[in-house]
Image: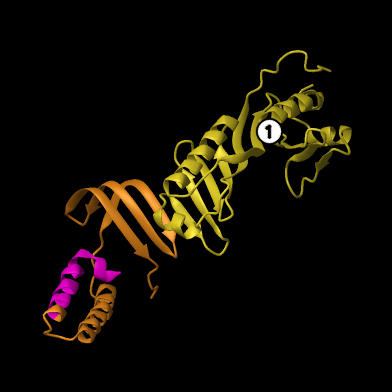
Chain colours: A orange, B yellow
Amino acid sequence: MWRNETSELSTSRYFENFTRTQQITPQLALQVLLQFDKAINTALAQRVRNRISFRGSLNTYRFCDNVWTFVLNDVEFREVMDLVKVDKVKIVACDGKST
Amino acid sequence: MEAGSEPLPLDILITNVVCVFRVRCHLDLRHIALKGANVMYKRDEGKVVMKLRRPRVTATIWSSGKIISTGATSEDEAKIGARKCARCLQKLGFQVRFGAFRVVNVLAVCSMPFEIRLPDFTKQQRPLASYEPELHPAVNFKIKPLTASMQIFSTGSITITASNVARAAQAVEHVYPLVLASRKGT
């Protein structure tokens, strides 16, 4: 799932490129991406500490295979002093590990 | 005893209309769960719950094509909600044919302008009314020919469950004189 997220899209593309030009083998690219998955999971769980609250109006919701997908409209993301306003937000949420 | 000679100035509020209908085709619940909007997939129970906003109804969809729709406030609204749900399924690509629409249950609420003495009422309506104050503070009154049942509270509010709206109204008209006889204040 992480690989479709925009910041990681570039990383996946990067490695695909490497494989295509045969600078690294596809297995190696796969291994790197798997390691990235593990690293990002631990990093988000342990190193990220800030808290953002958001409020908007719900357009649609979906719950399948324990995954919630929401589409919100006119959302305000609020961190302590920052405010970001967005017209449309798609949220895909899975069950987190409760520590 | 008024035999329904004059129309009763009572407001009967329909709180819930439950209906069933079929879409006459098998449905792929997984496809509905992944592509549909405002759906929740209950895989262990094998059903998809789709909530519509206007009219406010909740439809429970099975893979056989049978759908139960609840939450409407009138029979017409129930039918519109059912058709809307079928339309959503049609838009998802299924060969839907709307059929076998039937209102199954209607829940209504009615408030009498007086309070009622429940033990008194139960004594007079012995076999039909059952009152167990330790279990539930209302009298359960069943009207067999109308297949309606009601819960009568001492404050005067009555909750009616019947198979359609007309029968719910008839049930209220039937019980009004009986309840009037055991009201507080006479």
Image coordinates of residue B150 in percent, x first then y, are: 73, 37
Q: Nearer the viewer, residue B26 or B57?
A: B26
x then y, percent, for residue A62: 41, 55
Q: Main SS type for the magenta part?
A: helix
Label 1, secondary structure: give it. Answer: loop
Q: Mark 1 falls within which chain?
A: B
Picture quarter with the C terminus of chain A: bottom left
Along the viewing direction, whichever of B183 and A7 lies nearer the viewer: A7
Magenta range is A1-18
Q: Give the residue pinned by disc 1.
A: B164
Q: Position of residue B10 (x, y in %)?
A: 66, 22
Q: Quadrant of residue B140?
A: top right
**How far from the left and from the top, in percent, is residue A34?**
26, 81
Drawn side of residue B65 relative to residue B185, left or right: left
- Residue at the top extreme? B6
Nearer the observer, B83 or A77: B83
Q: Residue at x 73, y 27 (%)?
A: B172
The answer to which quarter of the image holds residue A37 is bottom left
**Rendered position, B86 above or below A33:** above
In this rendering, would A59 be left or right of A31?
right
Q: Residue at x 71, y 15 (%)?
A: B7
Mark 1 residue crowding within 10 angstroms, few (<14) / some (14–19) / many (20+): many
The residue sitting at 69% across, 26% down in the picture is B112
* Res B183 visible: no
Residue B140 drawn in magenta = no
The N terminus of chain A - image quarter = bottom left
Residue type pointed to by label 1:
Asn
Residue A8 at least partly seen: yes
Is A9 inside the magenta-drawn segment?
yes
Q: Residue at x 16, y 54 (%)?
A: A82
Instruction: Tell whether B69 sits left or right of B141.
Output: left
